[in-house]
Image (spheres, rainbow, N blue to C red):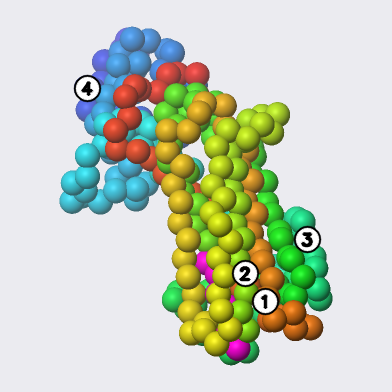
Amino acid sequence: MAPVSINQLPENILLELFTHVPARELLRNCRPVCSLWRDLIDVVTLWKRKSLRDGFITEDWDQPVTDWKIFYFLSSLRRNLLRNPCAEEDMGFWRIDSNGGDHWKVESLPGGHGTNFPDPKVKKYFVTSYGMCLKSQLVDLKAEGYWEELLDTFRPDIVVKDWFAARADCGCTYHLRVQLASADYIVLASFEPPPVIIQQWNDAKWNEVSYTFSDYPPGVRHILFQHGGKDTQFWAGWYGTRVTNSSIIISHKMTLKRGLANNSA
């Protein structure tokens, strides 16, 4: 019996086989094999099936997606790019830029004269002192799996969030600075709102700040995230700004214009 070529299988069978192949292998090794495989790998149905199989969408998904291939890759990479955002590893992964007063400290929620965090899974926070305390992380996007074409051609949304609070019995100032930088650390876009001042005898509630970078210049390879603050009473100890649950998440857009080339990775 003569051997049967895999290309003689019905296209729906080939599509089903491709749903089980890792996405980058499809583009690197499978797509260049022949025109049939190229055309099948470019079909929207394949990437919708892979998105469903990997739990990125549900059967009743009704949101418009222009490029399902990009949607799949961004969904597979989606995670918080900041490490140790909730102080579970003490000060691990954070660079201390300013360590004024009695320095940074980690405390457990709700803390003295504090309130519980809206998400009960968050158990700890970082707290500042009477001198300026700032800490930062520098995210290397290529090291995190985002390749140049994805960043420069499609420029997915970069969503930054942070949470801060004061003690009820002491005021504080909160600072945040986020910069998108090139491979050689030239700043291409930034978000640096004015410092927030919370007065003494406040409700100690947790406040969220959120910002989305969209349509930023091409060439972004790093993200600098820096936050902190100090108290306003100049009290010894840890009466300053409290921060926790910080995040940087890269998210797909729904209005992408072009398909992904086969040289991704």
Q: Look at mark 2 in the image and give the residue it sits on.
A: 173
Magenta residues, as a range? 163-169
Measured Cα–Cα span from mark 4 to mark 1? 71 Å
Q: Position of residue 32 (x, y in %)?
A: 43, 13
- Mark 4 crowd level (few <14, some 14–19, many ≥20, 10 Å Cα): few
Which of disc 1 and disc 2 is earlier in sequence?
2
Nearest to viewer (mark 1 / mark 3): 1
Nearest to viewer (mark 2 / mark 3): 2
Rendered image: mark on residue 10: 4
Of the residues shown, which amino acid type is indicated by label 1?
Thr
Which of disc 3 and disc 2 is earlier in sequence?
3
Which of disc 1 and disc 4 is earlier in sequence?
4
Q: Look at mark 1 in the image and give the residue it sits on.
A: 232
Q: Residue at x 58, y 61 (%)?
A: 195
Q: Nearer the viewer, residue 76 or 226?
A: 226
- In contact (CB < 8 Å): disc 2 and disc 4: no
Q: Position of residue 136 (x, y in %)?
A: 69, 54
Q: Secondary structure at mark 1?
A: loop
Location of residue 252 by image quarter: top left
- Mark 3 crowd level (few <14, some 14–19, many ≥20, 10 Å Cα): some
Say above or below: 193 vs 103: above
- Mark 2 crowd level (few <14, some 14–19, many ≥20, 10 Å Cα): many
Say above or below: 126 vs 2: below
Q: Residue at x 22, y 39 (%)?
A: 64
Q: Secondary structure at mark 2?
A: strand
